[in-house]
Image: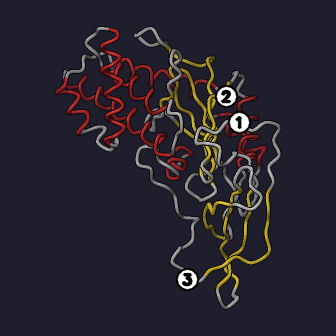
Amino acid sequence: MNDQENYSNGYNYNTGSIDNASLIDNTVPNLTTVDAIQEIHQTVDTVPENVHGGKFDPFTPIEKKRLQNSDGFLSNSYNIRVKETNSDNKYLEAGTVSENYLLIENKRVHDICSEIMDTSQLSWSPVKTYFDGKKYRNVWNTTEAGADLVVGDTVNLMLTELNSYDGSMKAGFRIDFMVLSCLNGMISNKFGWGYSFRHNMQNVNWDQEIRQGALQIAGHMQQDRIDQFARACNQLQRPLDLDKLGELRNGNINKLPALRFGQVVDRYFKEREEHRNDGTLWDLMQAGTYSLWHRDKMTNADFVNNGHFVDGVLGFASKIAVQA
């Protein structure tokens, strides 16, 4: 299994599936925490604005507490708690993990990804940070690696730091794409790729991980991936009528919630009216990624829906091209 397959097994943007191998069976009864607490503080100069809201900052202290049964028997499982912002004693129970689960704090992931970006010889700019107390994403983009589109726009690389305190995502990063003119993030399982940090019994060789991670965004591979994604986007220059919109909705993007689909279509028709054009699949793609990427308060589902929508529309355009 290669690194990309390993990463996809941890979290799939299209399906929202997670790797629960490290989680315990939550049917075990009568578990309480013991008094011994391991508190992990994360020191950082500035805390980025959280697009999920202000309840948690990404680098808040976390606690790891061992569980015990009602008879005093110590469990091999631990409770992970995350401190709420501006609160002395309010915590979120992020999850329950096994004894061998490697808990990596968000700040560590951020520091390692920063070193990886520094070694890439590309200049990266911060885009947005997401943390809901369990799942963490910190998004960057660069304009120094990209490909031109036939519409006159450009797609560039987008890097997202990833981590979780509930075992739902593996610590690492993911590479996807961003449209230069509107800064719409475009997540794609098919064309994007990722890297999860490897560990062995609570130990990580961070120097090795930095070297391996840097290889994911260096050399010819990243440009080849951008070029492939650009060619797929160039197939979106096809008229979109109501029949095709219905076929797309009932097929390739049928997992997109009805509310989000309505918002995407609403923006698509408003933009079409404003620019007085017939509308294309590219216009729908832009309406969809804008609606899903620029929400005032984002949720985990917005990232999942983005990946489903992007790959769904690209897949639909590829199918039409074959049939033409």
Q: Position of residue 308 (x, y in %)?
A: 39, 39
Quadrant the C terminus occupies: top left
Q: Position of residue 174 (x, y in %)?
A: 58, 38
Q: Position of residue 218 (x, y in %)?
A: 65, 27
The one of 92 and 184 positioned closer to us in this rendering: 92
Number of numbered callouts drawn: 3
Secondary structure under tag 1 reads loop
Tell me how far mark 1 sits from mark 2, CA to CA. Answer: 9 Å
The amino acid type found where label 2 is placed reads: Pro
Query: Would residue 144 appear left or right of 179 to someone viewing this image?
Result: right
User: Residue at position x 36%, y 32% from top?
Assistant: 263
Nearest to viewer (mark 1 / mark 2): 1
Does 177 appear above or below 98? above
Q: Position of residue 90 (x, y in %)?
A: 70, 60
Secondary structure under tag 3 reads loop
Q: Residues within 10 Å of mark 1 (few under 14, many from 20)?
A: some
Upstream in the sequence, badge 3 or badge 2? 3
Query: Would residue 64 appear left or right of 43 to someone viewing this image?
Result: left
Marks 2 and 3: in contact by CB < 8 Å?
Answer: no
Query: Would residue 117 appear left or right of 291 to someone viewing this image?
Result: right
Q: Residues within 10 Å of mark 2 (few under 14, many from 20)?
A: some
Query: Would residue 272 appear left or right of 82 to someone viewing this image?
Result: left
What label does residue 126 carry, if any? 2
What label does residue 29 carry, if any? 3
